[in-house]
Amino acid sequence: MRELSAGAIRLQLAPALRSPHATSVLLLATTLFLTAFGVLMVLSSSSIESHLDSDSFFARFGSQLTFAVIGVAVMLLVARLPLHLWRRASFVLLAVCCLLQLVAVLTPLGVKIGDNTNWLRIGPFTGQPSEGIKIGLVLWLGFALGSRERLLQDWQNLVKLVLPVAGGAILVVLLGGDLGTTVIMSAFTLGALFFAGARLRHLAVIVVAGAIAAVAAALSSATRRGRISAFFGGTSAVNPDVNWQLDNAHYALATGGLWGVGLGNSRSKWSWLPSADTDFIFAVIGEELGLVGGLLVLGLFGLLTWLLLRVLVTATDPTARIVTGTILVWLIGQAFVNIGVVLGLIPVLGVPLPFISAGGTALIASLIAVGLVLAAARDSAPRVNASP
């Protein structure tokens, strides 16, 4: 038997690893690993607060595990459906979720947490309509821009096409006070325009206008002004927990060192770190798994970025390309914001770490987004005709 050198093996494996099917398999495996890792970290970070709330160490873990199983099942179902089947449903989904968001904001069914009223409680179910708005907006942008790429070269067409729907959806979320989700939605809308081929000078004007609007929204709330003050070393008179949260997040990261204090051994989760299982779960990862664990998470999101880019560059259909690029900006941008907040690189914005933070609707929405990318990758894969 002829022996193969390491170089020969690499040459034989390279075409297989570059194939759309291999990209999809790696994307699915990375997503499942991130989701399983997230469920494990929710168990570790939420056990104490879960016991205090419900006299059970596993209540939040059980809820997150249930949502993870449902989300993975829905992701696999979405991945099997052709992307074009969502064309008519995309605007309906967006409209329904916007209506539910208005119900949360304007009726007693809404649940207010801090300054945000973006949760809707109907019977035993509590969820965030804004996560459904993300999915609906991603799909609408993909179909609307994918079929009108030439029109985007004109400024007036760009505004008439995108502003009423995308701007309206973003405004509805902002009415609930969730600036973090609004920033993410604005960013991926801009990303959709970029991947659709809009002129850079037009995008620059949108960026400047969006930045001015974001600053105005941030300064309009005493809580947000306090978060900005805390970021620059000041204090928040309205919400002193912001300073407490940032300080304890940094203590947790410093305590973890290189290898961490061990899985489950966090001290911060003993009511020292607010939102330990949601927005600040990365601090618990750094404490329990150390710098190595933090770099592992960053590496996984880096791998996810590379895989999404591979699907993006191989997409043959404009809609598939725009949907994939929009989801890339959404998931990776949200991860960057979440980790940046924990590290003290940007002011506090309440967005979860995709696939890892506790939160059922956010997890399901992220998994559905990956399902859409898998569908786009399958639709873009070259067809191989069987030999006669």
Image (spheres, rainbow, N blue to C red):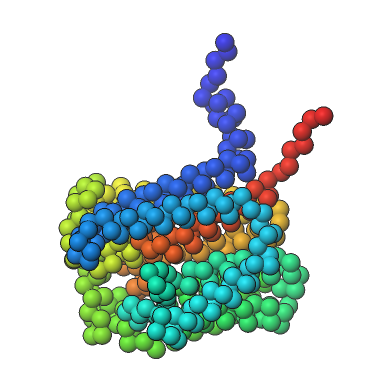
Relative depth, front residue between 82 and 289: 82
Q: Residue at x 43, y 85 (%)?
A: 107
Q: Residue at x 19, y 65 (%)?
A: 52
Q: Residue at x 28, y 54 (%)?
A: 43
Residue 343 can be seen in this image: no
Say if 380 sits above or below 231 in the image.
above
Q: Position of residue 151 (x, y in %)?
A: 75, 73
Q: Position of residue 267 (x, y in %)?
A: 17, 58
Say if 20 sits above or below 94 in the image.
above
Residue extending furthest top? 1
Number of numbered markers: 0
Q: Residue at x 39, y 84 (%)?
A: 108
Relative depth, front residue between 186 and 117: 117
Q: Position of residue 132 (x, y in %)?
A: 51, 69
Locate the C terminus and report the quarter of the image it occupies. top right
Q: Position of residue 316 (x, y in %)?
A: 71, 53
Residue extending furthest front? 123
Q: Is residue 319 left or right of residue 270?
A: right
Locate the N terminus and report the quarter of the image it occupies. top right
Residue 68 can be seen in this image: yes
Relative depth, front residue between 342 and 22: 22
